[in-house]
Amino acid sequence: MLPGRAPGLHLADVGKEQAERAAARIAELKQVDAVYASPLERARETAAPIAAARGLRVRTERGLLECDFGDWTGQELKTLMKLPEWGAVQRYPSGFRFPNGESFVEMQQRMVGAIEKLRAAHPGGVVVAVSHADPIKAAVAHAMGTHLDLFQRIVISTCSITAIAYSAGGLAVLTVNSTGGSLSELRPS
């Protein structure tokens, strides 16, 4: 199923365990100034143990929302994959708009704008932003200077950690889709 922005979807037990593992890994970082999450329940539930481990509260940021899949929300992936439009989603996402939803370009602009907003609110700080696979992939593609049409090549697993350093000198992608190991040494080389 393509859950998209469907309300009322909560983490299963395995998701809660993954969120706890992510929280433990993020707790290794020397500094975390804020924890933000998409307004969707599953993102806020993922962010909760991360914030709790640092004595912070989860703040909601609408810019971190999942892509608006419009009429495709809640549909079975096996059904969607049979549609002629599915090829555009995979090979030409920059030219695709979900029926009664948003385009991938709009999603990427929204996500990058949200990150910029969080950076401005916490200059020089470390911010954890809990979002969803497609917006994270779009943010990584932007940070790497990779065209949006190639963003489907990026893998983002559930509760994985992706870290991007922003500085006056530019951006550095520190890790993508990290699901294990220590984060204590994350920093630009």
Image (tube, helix red, strand yellow):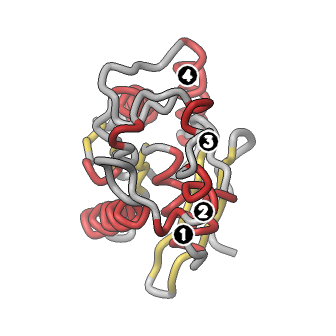
* Type of amino acid at the residue the image marks with label 4: Gly
Q: Is residue 76 left or right of residue 127?
A: right
Residue 137: x percent and y percent?
55, 57
> Measured along the vertical axis of the image, is residue 44 above or below residue 92?
above
Residue 99: x percent and y percent?
35, 48
- The answer to whether residue 14 of the structure is visible from this angle is yes
Q: Is residue 155 left or right of residue 72?
A: right
Tell me the number on the disc at residue 148: 1
Please tell me which of labels 2 and 3 falls first in the chain. Answer: 2
Please tell me which of labels 4 and 3 falls first in the chain. Answer: 4
Return the residue at label 3: 160
Return the residue at label 2: 151
Label 3 near label 4: C-beta < 8 Å?
A: no
Q: Report the mark closest to the observer, 1 or 4.
A: 1
Mark 4 residue crowding within 10 angstroms, few (<14) / some (14–19) / many (20+)? some
Q: Residue furthest right?
A: 181
Of residue 139 and residue 1, the one placed in the foreground of this image is 1
Tell me the number on the disc at residue 188: none
Tell me the number on the disc at residue 15: 4
* Type of amino acid at the residue the image marks with label 3: Ser
Please tell me which of labels 1 and 3 falls first in the chain. Answer: 1
> Measured along the vertical axis of the image, is residue 53 above or below residue 70?
above
> Measured along the vertical axis of the image, is residue 108 above or below residue 101?
below
